[in-house]
Image: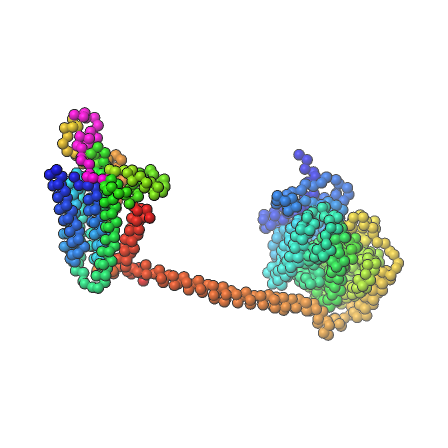
Amino acid sequence: MIPLAHYLILSGILFSIGLAGVLIRKNIIVVFMCLEMMLTAANVALVAFSRAQGTAGVPVYDAQVLSLFITGIAAAEVAIGLALIVAMFRARRTVESTALNSLKD
Amino acid sequence: MNMIHNLPWLFLLLPLVVAAIDWVCLNKHPRLAATLSLLSAAATLGLCIAYLTGLQTGTPGVYTWMPCSLEQLCLHLGLVMDPLAMRMMLVVTGIGLLVHFFSIGYMKGDPSNLSRYYAGLSIFMFSMSTIVLADNLAMTFIGWEMVGFSSYLLIGHWFNKASAADAAKKAFITNRVGDFGFLLGILLTLGFFGTMNFADMAGKAAGIAPAVLTVTIVCLFCGAVGKSAQFPLHVWLPDAMEGPTPVSALIHAATMVAAGVYMLVRLQVSMGTEAFTETACNIIAWTGAITAIIAAIMAVQQDDIKRILAYSTLSQLGYMVMAVGLLAGEAAMFHLYTHAWFKALLFLGAGAIIICCHHEQDIWKMGGLTKRMPLTVLCFMMGTCALIAIPGFSGFFSKEAILDAALSKNPVFFWIGAGVAALTTFYMLRLCIVAFMGPARDHGAEHAKEAGFTMALPLVILAVMAVISGYGFIANDLVPFNGFHAHGFALGLPFYVSMGALALGILLALAIYGLGGRTKDPLAGNCISKALRNRLYIDALYDKVIIGGLQQGFAHVMEFLDCYIIRGIICQTLVWFTVRIGYLCSWLQCGSLRAYTLVSAMGLIILILLLAYQF
Amino acid sequence: MFETSLCQILFCVLAALAILCAIGVVAYRNPVNSAMCMAVCFAMVAAIFFGMGAQFLGIVQLIVYAGAILVLFLFVVMMLDIHDEGHSKSIRWHSCVGVFIAGITAGLIFNVAISLPGATDTPCPVKTLCASAGELLIGDARQVSAEPTACTQYGGALPELNAAAAASMENPSISAEEAAKATSISDVKLIGKCLYTHYNIPFVILGFALLSGTVGAVALARKIRKD
């Protein structure tokens, strides 16, 4: 079987790519996708640990429940976030994150 | 539970409680307030008479207000019940009661809040009793400040009048100058005598260096200078006449201004006369003498009846202080006691005249009052006779006592005293001639008629006291000094000189003012008169030099510090730095989502390093 | 042995695909392409979940992420008709910074992952992982690091799933023989049991969060009437 480390490395790489996307991309929808990717990476790590921490071959299901919660919250977040993006696009006709600096002035 | 030994505390508690009730509850019921205050004054007088006639209740309890691990630093409140205090209490409560009574007539129909007035009187009775009965200097000081406060309240009773408000402020602030010295003196006493309690001070002066004693006594004397309105700080007393006349009689003639003299004599009795070094005595005596003489000179050219009396009070207080400085405490207290009665009489008489002349205070607008209000004028004349020391009146005996003491100690003071006596005779006769004789010069005086019962009764009682209080059969029992023996008639240099001064004053007054035919002052118009009317420019000097010069100069310095050092340099530098730091930090708030994410990511890295690698 | 290596190969392929697609999400300039890449990436992750025996989570991952959320993204992208991002120097500079930061993060996580206790012979550089929970709470973990073998279960392959134990855990009343007959774990039941007992209240709260999210989304996205 595959050692825990591999899952963690996969999770870390996915997370870092998501982070890089958030840092690099200007399009706020893509930034949002990258955020989702970071959450998924966390899910991978959680499920892997649930297996690793299990006793007698039974995973720790608390971790999986937590990952389920993350999925649920992510769904709610996407709903709100996309609604915000739509509202923002209506107001400014753009989805560039660089346009969101009116509070600075 | 036998609390009878705490009965003397009623002297303090009764007026205090009444004042609180008057002030807080009875704002809408001035008559009730007046009745309560009158009753409390009567009760304290009754208590005082009971004690003087031999009531014994044991030692009153001592209350420790502020405990301290060091015994001598504790703040005790205790009462001293020796004859000195009790007889002084008789003066305070006796005149207090008469003034309360007089006020009912005097303040009738006054539009101001009379409950406040009576509450002020009661507060004053409380604070004055505190001074008189205090068994230690700290408690004296508390009473000292309290009388200053009540004096402030009562001078400024008609606070709508700008001059009254200013006078109240002036009295309070001038007293503050003296009180500062007094406080220093109390601390020095505590330091060198090791106690503030009068009873424990005896005999301790012997072991203290004379220079230290001098400084201590002079500092304590500063308090008396402020409260008894002696020479450098005398300016507040004439202005204090802006208050209601009964207040002037009670506070600014009979009792409060005498508190300085009382305090000095109390110190002399408890510390022993050896504590009063020669330098200190000289300072005290000269201050008194200078006050007596310049006040008498200034009184000569005043037109306001109350101001004449105020300067006369100053002058008589100078006498008393001079006597204290000559280590003649018994003479000082004798004069304090007789002066309290006849000066209260004069002020209340002046009050009656002012009311009857429709609030006219200028003696040149009076005249012819002898016919219209004979009783008041008669009482006033009795007071005048006592003041100018006509033989047989009380003032004669006490003034002789002071002159005697002066002659035996230092003849210079004797001659000063004699000169002041001549001046006193002159200005008092001037007042009487101008105000009472000749035709009425104003319609206020034309329509004057005798004062009512509430005003006449105190006048009569005081007039009787003004005559008889100097005789030995009364004075020996009532003069506030232990083992006092009244001064009888004695032919000798003092008697002849004072008779000469009296005659000189009478002759001069008659020569200049005749028998009341004049309509304006023949002495007015020249530069000396102008200087005297302007109070020898002392007030103006204070205004210009101390307020205008020192205070303004100091204010300029402070303004410079404020504007340039604090605001200019310190604040501006701080502002500059803050602005720079703000600008430096503002790149963090660039408004770019990505930059924020970058910072968050760095924070994430730091978190990993901290949590996982435990840096 | 063969099975193990097959598993490994499968995992490597899936992981590589997932990473490639993730890079695609970031790299594609067209948001539609990004969204498609994300779908593939999430599907691969779901497959990895299946491989770990977490079938229920894998299915949820597919349905919620690759299904619902992706459709939402695509819908918004289409609706807003978003153009490509343009090239500019600042983009390149930002890319460098972003890649650098992400690299550091990845490196750190990589280091943590390979130095898990028991995975290597050398003492673990990650002090937290070496200490048991109780010791961590009390204080300085540096002192604990003297015993690098405090917990070793992270080393080596993940433990095999034990269907029998899971079955007896799922239903404690059955006998050991019956439990031994179980061939696969029905993790839906186990998760459900956990969810509706221990995590009942948070689960309800999560339901409210979703409800308020829905209401909020409607409130935000509707047209604001001017009057």
Where residue B410 appears, as percent x and y from the top left, is 81, 61
Quick check: is B612 in the magenta stretch? Answer: no
Dividing the picture into quarters, in which one does residue B60 lie?
top right
Farthest right residue in view = B491
Is residue B400 visible from the viewing direction of this image?
no
The span shown in magenta is C154-177
Farthest front residue in view = C122
Task: Determine whether B75 is above or below B564 in the image.
Answer: above
Q: Residue at x 16, y 47 (%)?
A: C15
**Left or right of residue A83: residue B420:** right
How is the protein colored in the picture?
Answer: rainbow
Where residue C163 appears, as percent x and y from the top left, is 17, 32
Along the line of sight, which residue is nearer the eye, C89 or A95?
C89
Q: Residue at x 50, y 65 (%)?
A: B565
Dividing the picture into quarters, in which one does residue B247 lie?
bottom right
Q: Residue at x 70, y 43 (%)?
A: B8
Q: Residue at x 17, y 53 (%)?
A: C23
Is residue B145 visible from the viewing direction of this image?
yes
Dividing the picture into quarters, in which one does residue B238 lie?
bottom right
Question: Image quadrant for the N terminus of chain B?
Answer: top right
Along the line of sight, which residue is nearer the eye, C11 or B546?
C11
Along the line of sight, which residue is nearer the eye, B256 or B605?
B605
Count of numbered circles in the view: 0
**Left or right of residue C150: residue B207:** right
Quick check: is C163 in the magenta stretch? Answer: yes
Where residue A74 appears, as percent x and y from the top left, is 22, 47
Where residue A71 appears, as percent x and y from the top left, is 21, 44
Along the line of sight, which residue is nearer the eye, B128 or B446?
B128
